[in-house]
Image (cartoon, helix red, strand yellow):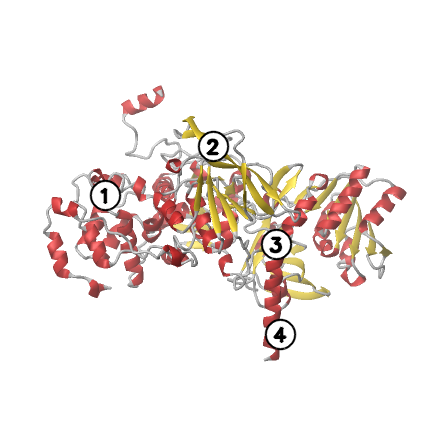
């Protein structure tokens, strides 16, 4: 039997994007679509929130898809099988509200496709017609396309550079779709904040209810620190317990973007320090 | 340390008359100089040297009817342990202490003794009270530093099992007492470390984490299992715990930070005290980049509030390198809920008190970072419900202070995670606390007990421990008898006339 929080799988999906399977049987049994975990690599590690992409209750594993953006995620990509995280806590956040809405457009941007997957799956199972729109900068960053096809009635793909699928943004595809086939009953958008912001801008014009999944900075994940607060409809909400999903038309995305950037300088410093250490080790 | 013991002096002190004892000045703990401690996180007071402890203990006149025991929420035999210290028998002192309090190194540091045991000390009437807290700390530190920490004996297995939610002061106390009685105890902790507020909230310079770890270690050695990263209300709910355990104690604390709801509170650089302190304490952000968690690199900080958490935040900001730290409080210094000692320490370290001030809004730059706090001057009006004079804003007195960081330390509500996911657990709709009979620590749900901040709202470590003590007694009884419909613990029923008085009021 694997050890608690052991890395069972660590594969490269795209440049700087890895898929992990982690042994965490209790969480794997409990988690539902839309929820997340917080993990910590070692005693000096930061607690970082990551949305659960999938889980296998039988095998007791959680699947995470993570992009290397800083020190913690860089250390994750270097984890070998059999190594373990010091802490994994969850499932956190409220699960996605799933019911039969009718036609639902599920939009995944970049690694946002990973957490969009369990939501598409659950929506499909609930009898919705699921149209998934996958977008990324370039072809290699379109991940989990096969899985998304299995979890959707239809999948539309686009890339910023036109290297794969339609040349354009997810909002272009969504707009075209609305114009040609009418409005979906609901839109789900998960991805970079800027993408979610523009999806919401578009769906507001068409008056389509839109749910977004937010990933602000967090520490404890149980509502204790309030670091993850976001303004929703003019009110301050704790994304860790009241989210992470909110009515996208009410979210103050500008504030979220700024709050996410607050530690950028330190994050960069920490990341560069780590990469320099790695280079030093390699040359020795 | 033993070689510093002067037996002759101890003998001389033994012979003192009460009048002479009362002439001995209250012994001070040596401490780090303010200039030095401004830039480190090491503990501020060093603790009494052994002979100062003996001298301090000799000030106690061993009252026939000691008031101090009543003044202690966990009922420590204070004259008993002090008598042993006076005799130079430190091991005897700590053993006496641990009959009732297993966490003395913690209590000796963070209890507000001046409003509890020391307040009612008979010496306080004419002179300064016996420094009970310093002596408590002394015996606990002596035991640990001498490597003499003992694991208390646990009772014969009862076959009963108890779940404790939250590894803070209340939960730890319940776990110790019930384990001593022979029950199996599992503590479920949401974070990755034990101690709750002792670990995430109270800074290293006031309560070193190695001390919390050492005291928790003893709990573990008693056979209490602690499961970290286990969030009751998320990973499983309370009813599932009740399937596994014969009784459950909820000590989930006051983990919901309040904000004022004023403009600009979501600007970058505006923290709750919980977040600020958790980053610095639990995540050791002061050691960034060696520790991965960042914290604002502040130059000018405004801390809002006047309690111990506000003092801790302000003093943390000083140590993190801030040049100017303001403490903005809407009443005057007299009304500050913080301990005098903490206020004095903060002032010595250069924290600037802005009393009778209140923030009205925060102003940010184009990056959404706070750059100014607009405050208004206040004056004190008529007393309010708390008995303190109500602060009233002076219209037109607004002004701004330049800041790059704001720490909001105006209090915490009870954590809603367990009540929100449990059926049949009544909650006070206004305060969010779990409705608890404070005589029995019973909640509205059979087999479920509660105590500490989740039961009464944010209070102190020692009150939480007192609740834990009471809950353990009550749980013990319940585990033996299975009886739930009681209003009081046996022997604690009020006299009939008291009952009548209560009804009148």
Residue indicated by mark 3: A28
Between residues A23 and B381, which one lies in front from this camera angle?
Answer: B381
Q: Quadrant of residue B249?
A: top left
In the rendered image, the vertical position of residue A80 relative to residue A165, given as above or below: below
Q: Nearer the viewer, mark 1 or mark 3?
A: 1
Q: Secondary structure at mark 1?
A: loop
Q: Secondary structure at mark 2?
A: strand
Q: First in sequence: mark 3 or mark 4?
A: 3
Report how far apart the C-alphas of labels 2 and 1 lie in the structure. Answer: 34 Å
Q: Is residue B228 visible?
A: no
Determine which of the numbered discs, if any, sits on residue B128 in the image.
Answer: 1
Q: Residues within 10 Å of mark 2 (few under 14, many from 20)?
A: many
Report how far apart the C-alphas of labels 2 and 3 lie in the structure. Answer: 54 Å
Disc 3, disc 4: CB below 8 Å? no
Q: Are marks 2 and 3 on the same chain?
A: no
Determine which of the numbered discs, if any, sits on residue B73 in the image.
Answer: none
The residue located at (37%, 55%) in the rendering is: B34
Q: Is residue B162 visible?
A: yes
Between residues A132 and B362, which one lies in front from this camera angle?
Answer: B362
Between residues B7 and A18, which one lies in front from this camera angle?
Answer: B7
Residue indicated by mark 4: A279
Q: Are marks 3 and 4 on the same chain?
A: yes
Q: Position of residue A83 (x, y in %)?
A: 57, 67
Disc 2, disc 3: CB below 8 Å? no
Residue indicated by mark 2: B378
Disc 4, disc 1: CB below 8 Å? no
Picture quarter with the C terminus of chain B: top left
């Amino acid at each position: 039997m694997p050890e608690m929080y052991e890395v069972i799988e660590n594969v490269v999906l795209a440049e700087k994007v890895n898929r992990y399977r982690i042994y965490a049987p209790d969480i794997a049994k409990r988690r539902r679509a839309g929820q997340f975990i917080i993990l910590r690599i070692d005693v000096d590690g930061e607690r970082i929130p990551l949305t659960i992409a999938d889980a296998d209750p039988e095998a007791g594993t959680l699947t995470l898809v993570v992009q290397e953006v800083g020190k913690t995620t860089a250390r994750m990509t270097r984890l070998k099988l059999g190594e373990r995280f010091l802490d994994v806590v969850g499932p956190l956040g409220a699960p996605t509200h799933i019911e039969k809405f009718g036609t639902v457009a599920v939009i995944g941007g970049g690694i946002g496709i990973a957490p969009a997957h369990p939501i598409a799956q659950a929506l499909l199972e609930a009898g919705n017609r699921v149209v998934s729109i996958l977008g990324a900068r370039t072809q290699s960053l379109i991940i989990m396309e096969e899985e998304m096809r299995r979890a959707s009635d239809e999948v539309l793909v686009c890339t910023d550079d036109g290297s794969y699928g339609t040349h354009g943004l997810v909002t272009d595809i969504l707009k075209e779709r609305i114009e040609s086939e009418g409005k979906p009953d609901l839109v789900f958008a998960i991805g970079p904040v800027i993408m979610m912001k523009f999806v919401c801008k578009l769906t507001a014009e068409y008056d389509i209810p839109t749910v977004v999944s937010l990933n602000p900075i967090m520490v404890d994940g149980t509502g204790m620190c309030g670091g993850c607060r976001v303004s929703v409809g003019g009110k301050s909400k704790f994304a860790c317990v009241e989210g992470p999903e909110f009515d996208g038309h009410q979210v103050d995305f500008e504030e979220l973007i700024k709050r996410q950037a607050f530690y950028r300088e330190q994050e960069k410093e920490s990341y560069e320090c780590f990469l320099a250490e790695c280079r030093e080790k390699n040359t020795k | 340390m033993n070689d510093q013991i002067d037996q002759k002096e101890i003998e001389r002190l033994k012979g003192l008359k009460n009048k002479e004892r009362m002439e001995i000045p209250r012994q001070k703990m040596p401490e780090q100089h303010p200039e030095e401690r401004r830039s480190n996180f090491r503990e501020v007071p060093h603790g009494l040297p052994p002979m100062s402890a003996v001298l301090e203990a000799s000030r106690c006149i061993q009252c026939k009817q000691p008031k101090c025991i009543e003044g202690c929420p966990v009922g420590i035999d204070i004259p008993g342990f002090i008598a042993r210290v006076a005799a130079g028998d430190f091991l005897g002192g700590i053993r006496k202490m641990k009959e009732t309090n297993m966490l003395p190194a913690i209590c000796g540091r963070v209890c507000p003794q001046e409003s509890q045991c020391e307040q009612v000390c008979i010496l306080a009437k004419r002179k300064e009270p016996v420094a009970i807290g310093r002596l408590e700390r002394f015996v606990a530190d002596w035991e640990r530093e001498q490597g003499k920490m003992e694991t208390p004996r646990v009772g014969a297995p009862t076959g009963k099992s108890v779940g404790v939610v939250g590894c803070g002061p209340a939960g730890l106390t319940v776990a110790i007492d019930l384990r001593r009685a022979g029950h199996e105890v599992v503590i479920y902790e949401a974070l990755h470390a034990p101690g709750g507020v002792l670990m995430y909230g109270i800074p290293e310079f006031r309560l070193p984490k190695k001390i919390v770890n050492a005291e928790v270690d003893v709990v573990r050695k008693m056979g209490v299992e602690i499961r970290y990263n286990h969030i009751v209300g998320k990973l499983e709910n309370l009813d599932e715990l009740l399937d596994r355990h014969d009784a459950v104690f909820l000590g989930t604390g006051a983990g919901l930070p309040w904000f004022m709801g004023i403009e600009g509170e979501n600007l970058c650089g505006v923290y709750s005290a919980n977040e600020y302190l958790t980053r610095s304490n639990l995540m050791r952000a002061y050691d960034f980049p060696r520790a991965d968690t960042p914290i604002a690199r502040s130059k000018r900080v405004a801390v809002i509030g006047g309690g111990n958490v506000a003092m801790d935040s302000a003093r943390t900001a000083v140590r993190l390198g801030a040049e100017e730290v303001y403490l903005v409080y809407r009443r005057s210094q007299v009304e500050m809920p913080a301990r005098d000692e903490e206020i004095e320490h903060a002032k010595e370290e250069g924290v600037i008190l802005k009393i009778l001030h209140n923030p009205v809004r925060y102003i940010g730059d184009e990056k959404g970072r706070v750059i100014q706090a607009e405050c208004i001057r206040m004056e004190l009006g008529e007393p309010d419900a708390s008995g303190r004079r109500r602060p009233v804003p002076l219209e037109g007195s607004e002004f701004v202070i330049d800041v790059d960081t704001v720490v909001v330390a105006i209090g915490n509500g009870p954590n809603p995670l367990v009540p929100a996911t449990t059926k049949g657990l009544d909650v006070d709709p206004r305060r969010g606390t779990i409705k608890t009979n404070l005589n029995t620590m019973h909640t509205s749900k059979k087999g479920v007990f509660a105590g500490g901040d989740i039961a009464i709202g944010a209070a102190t470590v020692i009150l939480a421990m007192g609740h834990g003590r009471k809950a353990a007694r009550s749980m013990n009884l319940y585990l033996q008898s299975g009886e739930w419909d009681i209003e009081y613990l046996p022997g604690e029923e009020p006299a009939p006339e008291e009952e009548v008085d209560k009804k009148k009021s």
